[in-house]
Image (cartoon, coloured by chain):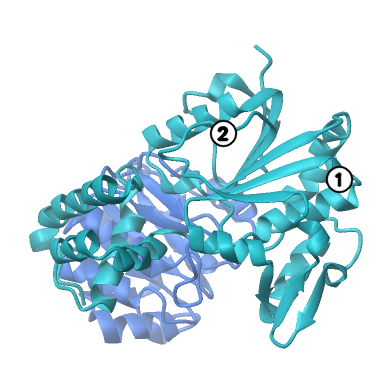
Chain colours: A blue, B cyan
Amino acid sequence: MYQAIVIGTSFGGLEALKTILPALKEDFPLPIIICLHIGEHNNEVFIRHLSEICKLPVKEAEGNEPILPGVVYFAPPNYHLQVEADLSFSLSTDKKLNFSRPSIDILFETAAWAYKDKVVGIILTGANSDGAHGLKTIKEFGGKTIIQNPCHAASPVMPRFALKIAKPEVRLHLEEIANYLNKLTT
Amino acid sequence: MSNYDESNSELLTIELNLLFEGIYQRYGYDFRNYSKAHIRRRVLSRLALSNLTTVTELLDKVLREPEFFKVFLDDLSINVTEMFRDPQFYQSFRENIVPKLKTYTFIKIWHAGCSTGEEVYSLAILLHEEGLLDRCQIYATDFNRKVLEIAKEGVYQKAEMEQFENNYIKSGGQHKLSDYYKSMYGSVILRKDLSKRIVFADHNLVTDSVFAEVNLIMCRNVLIYFEKQLQNKVLNLFHESLIPSGILCLGTKESIKFTSVDSKFEIVDPKQKIFKKKII
C-alpha cells in the first residue's frame, strides 16, 4: 500500500543507516530515498561500502531517473533531490534551505506531493532542524511519519525538532526501524 | 502554510499549466517543460510572499502587471552560483581541453545560462592563465536581463571571496584569486581586462535558436531544470552549434546518457561531464 520510504538524517546518520539498511529484507518492495547531509564531500566511498553490506542495490539518484522499487537512492552532495509527479527524480542547485543542500524538507515535501498518502517519512539522528517541516507535510498528506527516539539518537536535535513540529505517528529505537519497515511492507 | 494540499493537488496541477501557458502567450518565456517539483515550490513561495490565495490569482496579476511579471521571472530563474564552482571540473578543463584549444588560432566559446557571471569570469581567468584569452570570443548568455546586468558589472560580495579563493586553489589556479579583483568596501570588482573578450547577451535556450557556430559550449546546471524532451531539444541545439570535434561541458550531475544526442558525442571526462562532438 505504501509506495516509497524517504529518510532524512545528518550528524550520526551514516552509522544509523548502517544499522537500518543491511537489515532490510532482500525483496523489500519499495524505493528508499535518502537525504544525508554530508557537506560537499563525495558520496562514492560510503555508497560503495553500503552496497557491500546491503542486500538491496544502493546508488546516487540521478536527474530524470525513474524511481524503482527495492533500490536505495542517495541525494547527490550539493544538490537538492526532488520527486516528480511521474515518480522520477529531479535535481536543483537552488539556494540552501536550513543551511542544507541537499535539504530534507525539499525531498520530503516533493515526495508528499508525488506520493500523496503513500509515503513513509523517517527522521533519524541529526544536529539541525532540517526535515521537520517536510515531515509535517508528509503527515498533512496522510503519509506515515516516523522518528528515531531522540533520547537514544547520536544527536537528538533533528528528531526533536521533527517531534515538535510534525508530531509524528511513530517513535522507534534505531534497532527497531528495519524490522518495522519489513513488517509494514509485508 | 499554502492553500494547497492533498485535497486540491489536482487543481494545482491544472492551474500551474494554465499559468505557464499564460506566461508563454503573454511574454514568450516558456516554462511549460520545466521540471515541476522545483517550479511548484517557487510558485507557492511567491503566493505566500505576495499574499495571494490561488495560482489563478497569480496568473491574473502576472497577465495584467508586466512589472509584477518581472519579479516573478526572478523567482523562476536559479541564480545560485560560485566562482570555480566544482573545482575538479576546471582542473579537468586545464588538463583535457586547454591543450586542444591551443591548436586553434581563434576560439569561440558559448557559455549558456551564465546567470550572474561568476563562472564566465572563472573561465576567463583560466584562459588568461593559459595564455588563450586574447584568442577567445566568449558569448555569455542568459534569458534573465537582470542577472546579465550583474554579470556585466563583475562586482561581487567580499564575503563570498574566501569560498571562491578556496575553489580557485583547488581548481589548479596559478596565482591568487585576489590578483584578479580590487576590494572596495564590502564588494570586490573584477579586473576589466577579464571581460574584454566577453559579450553578454540575452538568449533563451528554450525559445531561441542557434546564434553562432562555436568551438566550445559550457552549460552547467541548467539542463537539470528541464524535462527530458526539453533537454533533448537543447542538447540538439548545442550539437548544431558546435563545430566538428567541438567541446560540450555540462554540470557534474548532468548527462547525455539516454538522450537523443548520446551517440553524437564521445566522452572526454565521464565524471566532469565533458564531451566532444563526433566528426560524423
Q: Is residue B102 above or below residue A141?
A: above
The tag on residue B26 is: none
> Which chain letter matches label 2?
B
- Residue visible at 15% across and 54% down in the picture: B15
Q: Residue at x 27, y 42 (%)?
A: A86
Mark number displayed over residue B134? 1
Residue A9: image quadrant is: bottom left
- The one nearer the camera, B214 or A37, is B214
For residue B89, say whether it is visible. Answer: yes
Residue at mark 2:
B211
Q: Position of residue A66 (x, y in %)?
A: 36, 39
| Badge 1: chain ID | B
Q: Is residue A71 above or below residue A101?
A: above
Label 1 vs 2, first from the N-terminus: 1
* Circle 2 residues within 10 Å: few <14, some 14–19, many ≥20: few
Residue B217 appears left or right of A152: right
Q: Residue at x 80, y 71 (%)?
A: B181
State the SS at label 1. helix
Q: Going by the picture, which residue comes out furthest to the top?
A: B280
Q: What's under tag 2, amino acid-wise?
A: Phe
Label 1 CA crowd tier, 10 Å (few <14, some 14–19, many 20+): some
Measure the C-alpha gap from mark 1 to mark 2: 22 Å
Q: Is residue B214 above or below residue B73?
A: above
Q: Are marks 1 and 2 on the same chain?
A: yes
For label 2, the SS is loop
Looking at numbered disc 1 in the image, what kind of residue is underneath it?
Answer: Asp
Q: Nearer the viewer, residue B196 or B175?
A: B196
Q: Position of residue A110 (x, y in %)?
A: 30, 59
Residue B89, relative to residue B44: is it above or below? above
